[in-house]
Amino acid sequence: MGETHIEAIRNLAYLLASVLFIFGLKGLTHPRTAVRGMQMGALGMFVAVLATVLGGGIVSWPWVVAGLLIGSVVGVLMALKIPMTDIPQMVALFNGFGGAASFLVAGSELVMRIAGGTAGADGQSVSQPSAYAAIPLQAMVPIAASGMIGSLTLFGSLIAASKLHEVSFEWRGEKVWMNDPLLLPGRHAITGVCFAACLVVCALVVTNPHTATWYWILIALAAVFGILITIPIGGADMPVVIALLNSYSGLAACATGFAINNNVLIIAGALVGASGLILTKIMCKAMNRSLANVMFATVGESAAAGPSEDEVYAGRIKSTSAEEVAMLFDGARRVVIVPGYGMAVSQAQHAVRDLANLLEARGTEVEFAIHPVAGRMPGHMNVLLAEADIPYDKLKEMDQINPTLETVDVALVIGANDVVNPVARSDPSSPIAGMPIIDVDKCRTVVVIKRSLSPGFAGIPNPLFAADNTLMFFSDGKKAFRELIAAVKES
């Protein structure tokens, strides 16, 4: 079979993989088709990888096989061992790994072209005397773009993952938590200078194709830039940051595809980049904030200006027990459950399902109110509730359920904080001012399940906890729901 026929077959395989990616992405838009969408996406990736490795241009098969085996083992272990509560961190790391793969592939392409002996993903050799002189501009520009975007994605994602994991370290005798905004003096000027330096080095990479030195300097500068733009962002904005970094990883892959002339990488990267930007816009809208506000302001900067916890809670907190809540359920016709990150931490989703089923068996209407940024990644609550086999039609988006909350007898909030904080509506100076929330304070009775009165990621107290119609059930989420199930059965 001639080289022309091999190229044609490979491009047909790439076309098939691209179609599978598109239909897979379409499937992910609805919970009912999400699993099938994931399977189609995985099949598309398998076809793309198979077409690439069998299409020629492989320098060393042992390295390819070793990479596949190591990556497969690591991936399977991560999927099996990492708990659901750590999925956001893993997603952040995957974004970073995508960026790393992109800038390493682009860098290796540059190094091999300079050396004069690469076959690239397109199978076409560029080996010739003074090979650096033959590297076209259309290859150097995407190589530089892949290096900058991929590196800032990797190191920005590492910071995001550490924030999500609530990593801490000692600094001058004090404990510093990564999920808090880390505000450097003159940070905007420092970040601006670093960004300008990255652009200058990008130009030097493009105009000096005979050396890879500038490329690796670019990688280092972009790494610093990725760290600088991520550390000032508070934990409450992490869903937006994850979506944005996901988009960056796609853009880096797309640029690498242009650098190595790989059609499926261009298409897949463009799909990821575009979908990530759309998701970022949706997340920003859900928080009533612009992307610039997320990236260049911080949720935590103005937190100290608000009232203290003592001022908000002193003498106003009313504790309750499982038995008292069960009595509320006895006369309730409609119950709404609002999940938050506390549900994920306690892994209470199955106990939540069991209570919902028990109440429905007694004739109570039960629904779930889902805030777009509840948890630590987009769709976090949807994933957890789907894992517990809760029917999709029971999950109501914020805009859908808010107009009806005044008719709700009991709202059961488990671990949510900022997404139900009425300060977003009432205090223009609040860090979360203007952020759309689930209006549970309008329900007849609100029961909040939390281990303590500790604030959410925004770092501010929640007046809902001290409201006249609110009862606080202090307990671990899973334990609380088990106690509620037992109390309801006895009532």
Image: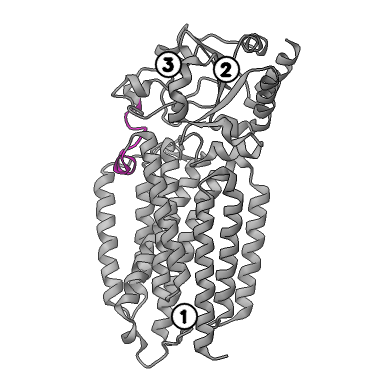
Question: Which mark is nearer the camera, 1 or 2?
Answer: 2
SS of the residue under disc 3: helix
Highlighted range, magenta: 290-303
Question: Which mark is nearer the camera, 2 or 3?
Answer: 2
Residue type of the residue flagged with mark 1: Asp
Give the farthest residue toward the right.
490
Residue type of the residue flagged with mark 2: Arg
Disc nearer the start of the sequence (1/2): 1
SS of the residue under disc 1: loop
**CA separation, marks 2 and 3?**
24 Å
Question: Could you say which disc has been placed on residue 334 in the image?
Answer: 2
Question: Could you say which disc has been placed on residue 467 in the image?
Answer: none
Local packing at callout 3 (Cα closer than 10 Å; few below 14, some 14-19, many 20+) is some
* Residue at the (57%, 77%) spot, across then down: 53
**CA separation, marks 3 and 1?**
61 Å
SS of the residue under disc 2: strand
**Mark 1 and mark 2 residues within 8 Å of each other at the beta carbon:** no
